[in-house]
Image (cartoon, helix red, strand yellow):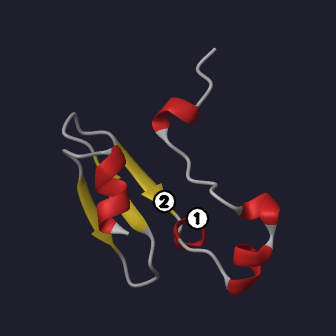
Amino acid sequence: MLRKIKAVNPDAKVVFDEKGNATVTTKDGAVATIPASDLVKTNNDLTDPAKQDTVKKPADKNTC
């Protein structure tokens, strides 16, 4: 998980809590919490084509 988050946010500090949520703090001080449910896939997710490769990256956000 850490490597995947760092690939998108290389200068960020990443901390995982006891529930598996990741808190990401960027070098400019922005903080975001990623729920554990968004970080992992269940066995059912692995066989559901609609849930394949759903990694969200900052570039995916629509800022219009």
Work out whether residue 23 or residue 1 is closer to the camera in this orientation and state it.
1
Tell me which amino acid carries mark 1.
Asp
In the shown orientation, is residue 13 left or right of residue 45?
left
Q: Is residue 36 above or below residue 7?
A: below
Disc 2 secondary structure class: strand
Percent of width and height locating residue 37: 60, 71
Closest to the camera, between mark 1 and mark 2, is: 1
Residue drawn at point x = 52 percent, y = 67 percent? 39
Work out whether residue 52 or residue 23 is closer to the camera in this orientation and state it.
52
Percent of width and height locating residue 43: 69, 85
Work out whether residue 37 or residue 8 is closer to the camera in this orientation and state it.
8
Disc 1 secondary structure class: helix
In the shown orientation, is residue 49 left or right of residue 22?
right
Tell me which amino acid carries mark 2.
Ile
The answer for how far apart the CA atoms under marks 1 and 2 are is 7 Å
Residue drawn at point x = 62 percent, y = 57 percent? 53
Residue marked by disc 1: 38
Residue drawn at point x = 36 percent, y = 56 percent? 5
Residue 34 is marked as 2
Work out whether residue 32 or residue 53 is closer to the camera in this orientation and state it.
53
Q: Are marks 1 and 2 in contact (CB under 8 Å)?
A: yes
